[in-house]
Amino acid sequence: MLDAAAIRKDFPILEREVHGKPLVYLDSSATTQKPLQVIDALDHYYRTTNANVHRGAHTLAQEATDAYEGARAKVASFIRAATPREVIFTKGTTHGLNTVAYGWGLEQLGEGDRILLTVMEHHSNLVPWQIIARHTGAELVYLDIAADYTLDLSGLEDVLDERVKIVSVSGMSNVTGTIGPVAELAEAAHAVGAIVVVDGAQLVPHLPVDVDTLGADFLAFSAHKMLGPTGVGALWGRAELLERMEPFEGGGEMISDVQLHESRWAPLPHKFEAGTPPIAGAIGFGAAVDYLTGVGMDDVRAHEIEITRYALERLAEVPDLKVYGPADLDSRGGAVSFELADIHAHDLATILDEEQGVAVRAGHHCAKPLMRRLDVASTARASFYIYNVPSDVDALVSGLMRARQIFGVG
Amino acid sequence: MALDELYREVILDHYRNPRRKGTLTIPHIHAEGQNPSCGDEFSLDIAVDDGKVVDAAIQGIGCSISQASGSMMADAIVGRTVPEITDLTRQFKRMMSIEDGDNPVDGSRPGSVLGDLEALQGVRKFPVRIKCADLPWATLEDALAQLEGANKGHGDSET
C-alpha cells in the first residue's frame, strides 16, 4: 500500500492555501499536480541540456536527443510496448486520437463503413470521428450504458458486424469513472476485422496497463493526467498498423527525403512527429513515468480503490446526493460525479472552493452526449490520485453540508 | 463573508422561482444563448409594441447565478423602452465590471434603475462566475440586435 502522506511531501503545490484553507485538490481527472521530480527534470533540462533533437552534431543536441529518446523508452516500458518505435509523442490524448482518426480513418473508411463508439466518450473521442464520418461517408454507431453505469455489451452483436472498421472506446470514463471492457470489446472487434482505439486519458494514469493484454491496436494518453507536464502525450500503436498509417501532419523531422512534388516518410516513430516536438515535456513525462513506476501501479490502483471506497461511503451520508457512476469498485476508477439536491454544480464548486479550499470540476466534463443520456445538465466531480488522503474527502463532505445550508436544503 | 454576498436570499428565490418562465405564443423576437464552457443555456422571448417591451418569457438550464440573473432581467425589461433597456444593460455590465472594469457602479445608490439586480453585485468577487450572470444579458443583446435588424428591414421595405 502506498504512503499517501509521504507522497504528498513530493508535491509542493499541496502546501499552498486557498481562501485561508489548505488546498484540497480533487480535480486530478482534469490534470494532476506535479512532483518535485518532474519539476526538477524540466528545470534540469532547460538549465543544462536544451537543444533541438535529431538535428545537430553538437554535444547538447546529442544529449537532448538521448534524453528525449530515453523518455520514449520509459513510456514504452511503462505500458509494456514491444518497442519504443511504437510510441509516438503527441500533444496529448486529443492529438493522439486525431492522429488515428485522420491517419487511419480518413484513409481507410468509405461509404457503408461504420465506426463504433460509446455514449460515454469524451468529446475528444467523438468529434474527430464525426469529422471523419463526414469526410468519408462512414456511419457512427454507439454502444449504450447500462443502469449500473457500466458499458452495456448486451446489444454488441447487433451493432458489431463486418461493416464496423473501427471501434474507439474510453478505457475509463472521466465522468462516471466506468472502466471500459476493452479486452472483451477488442476480441469481438478483431473477430469482424475492426481495429480498436482506446482513449486512455483516464486509464493509463490509474491502472497498470499492458498493451498486449489490453487487446487494443491504438492507445492514446496524456502526460499531464499522470504527474507529467501539459502539452505532451503519447500514442501507442501496433507497429504493423503504424507502418500502414498515413501521417496526420507533415513537416520537418517526419521525412526521409523531400522533393518538390513528393516526399518519403521517416521510419517509425518519427513519421508521426512533424516539427520540433515537446522535448522538455517528453523528458518531464519520462520523469513522471519513473515516479509512478517507483510507487508501483498496482499500489496506485489499490490506493485509488480505497480512497474511492471511503468517498462513496461518506458521500452516501449527505442527504439528497446522487452519485452518477458504478457502485462496484472493481468496475470504476476514482472519478466520482454527483449532484446535490437542486444545487447546480457550479454553485457547489464555488462554495467548496470558498469554504473548504476544495477544488472540484463542475459542468458537462466535455461529455455532453453522456450528460444527455444521464438526463442531467451538469454534475460536480471529485477525482482522486496518489496524493489524496481521507481528510480530503472529509473536507469535501463538510463543504457539501455547508452548501445545503446556504441553499436552505432540508 | 463573500459567499453570503453571492448567495443572497433574493438570488436563491429567483433561482427556485424564476419569473416569467416559459415562452410567448407569438414572440416578436426569440434569442438563445449558451456558455459552451459550462453548458448553461438561456432562451428569451420578447414582445415589443411601439418601441417598448410589453412581454418577456425565459427558459434556461444553469446555475443559480445565471438563472437568477435571467429571471431578474426578464422582470426588469418589461415595460421599458429599447433605449431604456440598452441603458439598463450598460449599467448592469458596469456593476458587474464587465464594462469599465476599474469603475464599478454602486448599484445601491439612489436613483439606480437596477432594482433587484443589485443583489448580483456579490458576483464581482468571483470572476469566474461573472460569465454566468452575463449569459442572459448577452442573449438580450442578441434579441435587441435582431429587433434593430427587423426594424431596419421593415423601414427599408417601405422606402
Image: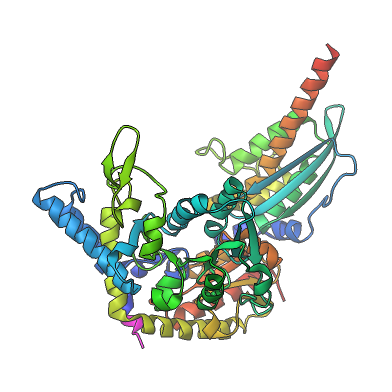
The residue range painted magenta reads: A1-6
Residue found 39% across the figure and 79% down from its top: A208
Give the position of the C terminus of chain B as an image quadrant: top right
The single residue placed furthest to the left in the displayed view is A59
Q: Is residue A140 visible?
A: yes
Horizontal arrangement in the rendering, residue B135 relative to residue B146 (left or right): left
Q: Is residue B116 visible?
A: no
Q: How far from the left and from the top, in percent, is residue A81?
A: 33, 71
The colour scheme applied to this rendered structure is rainbow
- Answer above or below: position of A316 versus A384: below
Q: How far from the left and from the top, in percent, is residue A39?
A: 26, 63
Please identify the quarter of the rendering in which residue B83 is found.
top right
The single residue placed furthest to the bottom in the displayed view is A1
Q: Is residue A35 magenta?
A: no
Residue found 29% across the figure and 50% down from its top: A266
Please identify the quarter of the rendering in which residue B78 is found.
top right
- Depth check, front residue: B55 or A74: A74
Q: How far from the left and from the top, in percent, is residue A37?
A: 25, 68
Residue found 36% across the figure and 57% down from its top: A243
Q: Is residue A4 magenta?
A: yes
The single residue placed furthest to the right in the displayed view is B25
Residue found 75% across the figure and 59% down from its top: B13
- Answer above or below: position of A112 versus A401: above
- Depth check, front residue: A393 or A204: A204
Give the position of the N terminus of chain B as an image quadrant: bottom right
- Depth check, front residue: A329 or A5: A329
What is the number of callouts on the image?
0
Q: How far from the left and from the top, in percent, is residue A351?
A: 56, 65
